């Protein structure tokens, strides 16, 4: 009983196909405007794609093939949506908010409230039952919203950046709560935070410009990112190009030397990946093999833990504040980024 | 200017206050002049005369009926205008709002040619034994015609402000559209609906031109308070002034009551970030 989706929406350049097992949670990562929310809107029935098909647990959610044209209304889909804002109905108490799903499914008032109380207790919000949404903090409201979504007994839970609007104290609490309630449940979670993907998801999908640019188990994607976006999330530098004997050659002719496991042949598409900590910064060109040395222009300097992160030429380097002061680094300067070839991993794109 | 502590910067230049004061005086002065003209010793007998009480009762009953009709017709109109885009939507809105700018007499004539004995629908209704023109029903129709836009405008605004996020969430929780309307949409826009209903009631209460043209002025049947006032003005100025004051008092009471109520159902601040 899997969830299977194929959908295209030309107006937003959206073309995605994915599938999800019965108890699997996937995280959707991607830059703003990549089509992440479009994906959830299409699944939940709030937005109609141009073409495609979706099946959830044997039920067809939509099938827009020319001769079919099946479209299920949102309330018959069993795909509860949890957004960045809690969106609790302001005129109902927390309990009645959570009881809304069971009530809509036809449960009696008493039974619905009983279900609601169960889920409120499940998210540690039993004592908030009588409160109005206006009397709840952001974290409390989002917990109640989680209970409300779960009380509707969805076959697929859709979470659209549920932690994004919470402060630094409320977010970890909700993340732990979600880890508990998502276990054994089918869910899709949109997030900007790699920690969410690590803690909550079995797999990640990276969405860029309305298309899936990378997909796989969370660990693999973080260890061996193939897209620039995933590399950024994993805190790694990534250079894409064509594999040559020396390493990877970019479209601009820059050669990054590194090591690969030998299964790669020259001419294949490949990426060179290395951590910012492996990059040294020099004012003059350094020679000596096996080293990479690239002249780059500094765009930005920012604090990064107890290091200074130097952004230049689409790459980044971490150096100590003392080294930065010694070198007199400033945006606009041209410096040399030097990376030992041994620190550069090369694998297929 | 001597401001109370705890108030912030308003950004209003001082001369604005002078013009605002002139505007307030312009609205209040005629009321004061009218109050000054009231024959107080005779006030109670004047407003409790049989014709006055009949007119007042008729006004209140027909205005209540018109307000109910405005809600029944106006809520679906506002929903359609605010939510689902369709071809001709702007045109429909323009026509619904037309009575706002139309002279009420013209509205009355239009209604007469629709529901009157020789009118578009009137002829068929006549065959069915129903006569609308110059009846109390005609008063209600005339008032509904002029008051409907007030309800539609204020409710459509409330619906647009509320947005449809809550409705989308309710639908994904399994609520069918009628349930969403009853349990989410209407409660969310209740303040807008209430103020729209109050405006409609007040507009109905004051309606004169369309009523006179379409319903006439039969005591106890179609002669509402504004018509009674106009009639009395010819013969008994004191009675006209006293009744005018009564109408003002009723209007102020209705508007005051509805605006004093706590605004239930309003989303807490910060929800629409």
Image (tube, rainbow, N blue to C red):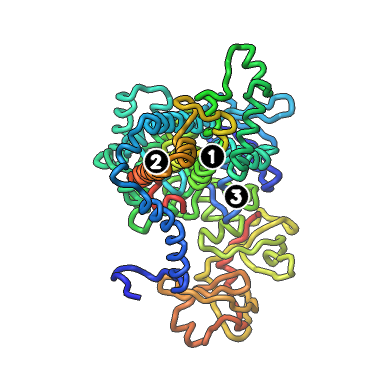
Between the C-alphas of marks 3 and 1, the distance is: 43 Å
User: On the rendered structure, is B98 left or right of B167?
Assistant: right
Q: Secondary structure at mark 2?
A: helix
Observer able to see residue B176 = no
Q: How far from the left and from the top, in percent, is residue A74?
A: 54, 32
Of the 4 image quadrants, the one containing the N terminus of chain B is bottom left
- Work out whether A13 lies above or below B48: below
Q: Residue at the location (57% across, 21% down)?
A: B132
Q: Residue at the location (58% across, 35% down)?
A: B80
Q: Are marks 2 and 1 in contact (CB under 8 Å)?
A: no
User: On the rendered structure, is A341 left or right of B234?
Assistant: right
Q: How far from the left and from the top, in percent, is residue A20?
A: 54, 36
Residue extending farthest to the top is B128
Q: Chain of mark 3?
A: A
- Work out whether B38 lies above or below A332: above
Q: Residue at the location (52% across, 46% down)?
A: B157
Between the C-alphas of marks 2 and 1, the distance is: 36 Å
Between the C-alphas of marks 3 and 2, the distance is: 77 Å
Say which mark, if any, is on residue A207: 3
Q: Secondary structure at mark 3?
A: strand
At label 1, counting other C-alpha atoms closer than 10 Å, the crowd grade (few under 14, some 14-19, many 20 or more) is many
Q: How far from the left and from the top, in percent, is residue A66?
A: 74, 28
Front-most of residues A219 and A227: A227
């Amino acid at each position: 009983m899997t969830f299977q989706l194929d959908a295209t929406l030309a107006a937003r350049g959206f073309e995605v196909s994915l599938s999800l097992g019965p108890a699997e949670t996937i995280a959707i990562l991607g830059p703003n405007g990549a089509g992440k929310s479009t994906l959830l809107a299409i699944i939940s029935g709030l937005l109609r794609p141009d073409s495609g098909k979706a099946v959830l647990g044997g039920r067809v959610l939509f099938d827009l093939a020319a001769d079919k044209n099946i479209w299920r209304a949102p309330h018959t889909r069993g795909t509860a949506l949890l957004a960045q804002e809690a969106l609790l109905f302001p005129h109902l108490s927390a309990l009645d908010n959570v009881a809304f799903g069971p009530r809509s499914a036809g449960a009696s008032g008493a039974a619905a409230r009983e279900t609601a109380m169960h889920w409120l207790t499940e998210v540690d919000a039993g004592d908030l039952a009588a409160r109005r949404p206006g009397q709840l903090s952001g974290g409390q409201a989002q917990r109640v919203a989680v209970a409300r979504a779960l009380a509707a007994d969805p076959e697929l839970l859709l979470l659209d950046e549920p932690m994004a609007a919470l402060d630094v104290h409320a977010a970890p609490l909700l993340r732990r709560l979600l880890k508990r309630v998502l276990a054994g449940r089918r869910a899709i979670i949109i997030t900007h935070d790699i920690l969410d993907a690590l803690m909550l998801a079995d797999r990640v999908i990276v969405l860029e410009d309305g298309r899936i640019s990378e997909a796989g188990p969370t660990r693999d994607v973080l260890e061996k990112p193939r897209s620039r976006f995933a590399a950024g999330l994993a805190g790694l530098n990534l250079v894409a190009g064509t594999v040559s004997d020396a390493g990877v050659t970019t479209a601009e002719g820059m050669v990054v030397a590194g090591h690969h496991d030998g299964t790669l042949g020259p001419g294949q598409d490949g990426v060179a990946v290395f951590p910012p900590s492996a990059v040294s910064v020099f004012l003059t060109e350094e020679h000596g093999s096996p080293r990479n040395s690239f002249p780059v222009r500094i765009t930005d300097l920012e604090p990064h833990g107890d290091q200074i992160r130097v952004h230049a030429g689409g790459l980044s380097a971490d150096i100590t504040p003392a080294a930065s002061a010694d070198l007199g680094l400033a945006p606009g300067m041209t410096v040399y980024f030097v990376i030992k070839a041994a620190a550069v991993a090369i694998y297929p794109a | 200017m001597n401001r109370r502590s705890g108030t912030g910067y308003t950004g209003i230049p001082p001369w604005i206050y002078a013009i605002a004061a002139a505007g307030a005086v312009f609205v209040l002065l005629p009321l004061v002049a009218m109050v000054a003209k009231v024959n107080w010793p005779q006030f109670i007998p004047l407003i409790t005369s049989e014709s006055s009480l009949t007119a007042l009762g008729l006004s209140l009953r027909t205005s209540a009926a018109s307000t109910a009709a405005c809600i029944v017709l106006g809520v679906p109109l506002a929903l359609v205008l605010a939510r689902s885009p369709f071809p001709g939507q702007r045109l429909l809105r323009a026509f619904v709002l037309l009575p706002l700018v139309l002279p009420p007499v013209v509205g009355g004539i239009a209604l007469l040619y629709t529901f009157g004995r020789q009118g578009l629908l009137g002829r068929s209704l006549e065959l069915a034994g129903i006569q609308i023109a110059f009846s109390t029903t005609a008063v209600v129709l005339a008032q509904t015609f002029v008051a409907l836009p007030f309800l539609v405008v204020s409710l459509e605004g409330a619906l647009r402000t509320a947005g449809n996020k809550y409705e989308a969430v309710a639908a994904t929780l399994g609520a069918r559209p009628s349930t969403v309307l009853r349990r989410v949409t209407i409660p969310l826009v209740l303040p807008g609906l209430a103020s729209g209903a109050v405006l409609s009631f007040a507009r109905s209460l004051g309606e004169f031109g369309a009523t006179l043209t379409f319903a006439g002025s039969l005591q106890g049947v179609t002669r509402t308070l504004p018509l009674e006032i106009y009639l009395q003005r010819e013969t008994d100025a004191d009675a006209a002034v006293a009744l005018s004051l009564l109408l003002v008092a009723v209007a102020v009471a209705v508007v005051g009551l509805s605006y004093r109520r706590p605004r239930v159902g309003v989303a807490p601040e910060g929800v629409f970030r």
